[in-house]
Amino acid sequence: MIDLSDNPHRRYNPLLDEWVLVSPHRTKRPWLGQVETLPPDNRPSFDTKCYLCPGNTRANGEVNPNYETTYVFENDFAALLPPDPNAETTTDGLLQTQPVGGECRVLCFSPRHDLTLAQMEPSAIREVVNMWADQVTEVGARLKWVQIFENKGASMGASNPHPHGQVWACDYLPTEVAKEDACQKSYFDHHQSSMLVDLVKQEVDKAERVVDQNEHWVLLVPFWAIWPFEYLLVPKRPVQRLPDLNDVERNALASILKSGLGAYDNLFQTAFPYSMGWHGAPTDGKEHPHWQLHAHFYPPLLRSATVRKFMVGFELLGEAQRDLTPEGSAARLRDCLPTL
Ligand code: H2U
Ligand code: ZN
């Protein structure tokens, strides 16, 4: 058997039916590429120019209330709009279009301009968990897919450092979600159990890719991770959607978020950038036992606070590739867990 920690090999991602090339022997190569400059991080707790701070005026002239925990508003520049009843599918040979309907919201995580989710108290993170779950209930009553996500850090395209996330909800299953839906369905049909619930059992037994866990949640670097320090966060019992989490599970989620994001910040001694988001069963009013709720965290950093991974060359033209093994990344992140 080849030593996976030192030889090139491919790994299978059963959630997307895709492969990733792993090249662990390359980690010793010298780096002469781009070094990103770090944005200054001496933010005030309130910024008069921030459109998310309490009491400030947004681009469309609306004034934010003096909120004390979390605050949700309709995105003033929404990427999705309510469906146009007259819109139609069009086909011209290979060229097709489809009408879409949806809505976008902005989720303020805290009135404090200077905090990040990682720096917030577990009780305040718990408010964010409640907000996420409430959004799925509320918006999911109208639309079958409610994508909750956070882009953190300028390098991930966040336009404002004030801690916030977004909801983009739509009347169709987006591409990545449709792939996860099909893969989980096929696994469930073959095994009569949910793929990610089974994965959690296997990973907790092995422990080598687990970064942190508590009674209700496991945080791990997936075997098939593409991003150097990618996380998959999964509840241990079968749970289809965020609103299904009970009180105890929500507190446990706040706590594991605090520790997992703390490990990110400690790793390169920086406010770690990432895109994260939740995947759960579609909100179409039906049961989807093949679906297991989970969150993905995709951070771009590779070697330091200033050296990031790029998806280029072979990755764009062939398939995704990584140098560090997921096992090595998980071990480094475990070493960085904060003492809470
Ligand atoms: P990002 O930082 O992740 O881009 O999210 C900020 C969102 O806030 C962005 O989608 C919206 C932008 O459209 N926004 C408003 O809705 N109102 C504003 O006054 C400014 C920005
Ligand atoms: Zn602010």
Image (cartoon, rainbow, N blue to C red):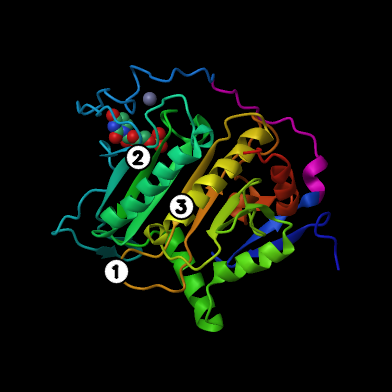
> Is residue 37 found inside the magenta-colored segment of the image?
yes
Mark 2 sits on what residue? 107
Q: Position of residue 233 (x, y in %)?
A: 55, 54
- The answer to whether mark 2 is within 8 Å of ligand 1 is no
x and y percent of residue 97 in the render?
29, 59
The secondary structure type at the circle numbered 3 is: helix
Which structural element holds mark 2? strand
Q: Is residue 107 left or right of residue 329?
A: left
The quarter of the picture where residue 268 lies is top right
C-alpha separation, residue under disc 1 versus residue under disc 2 = 24 Å
Circle 3 residues within 10 Å: few <14, some 14–19, many ≥20: many
Ligand 2 in which quarter: top left
Q: Which mark is residue 285?
A: 1
Q: Residues within 10 Å of mark 2 (few under 14, many from 20)?
A: many
| Quadrant assignment for the N terminus | bottom right
Which span is picked out in magenta?
Answer: 25-39
What is the secondary structure assignment of the residue under circle 1?
loop
Q: Is residue 265 above or below residue 22?
A: above
Q: What amino acid is labelled 1 in the image?
A: Gly
- In the picture of the structure, the residue carrying the numbered disc 3 is 250
Locate residue 250, reporting x and y percent. Answer: 46, 52
**Residue found at the far left of this picture:** 86
Looking at numbered disc 3 in the image, what kind of residue is underneath it?
Answer: Arg
* Label 2 – label 3 distance at C-alpha: 18 Å
Q: Do the CB atoms of the residues marked 2 and 3 lie less than 8 Å apart?
A: no
Distance between the alpha carbons at the discs numbered 1 and 3: 22 Å
Q: Main secondary structure of the magenta part?
A: loop
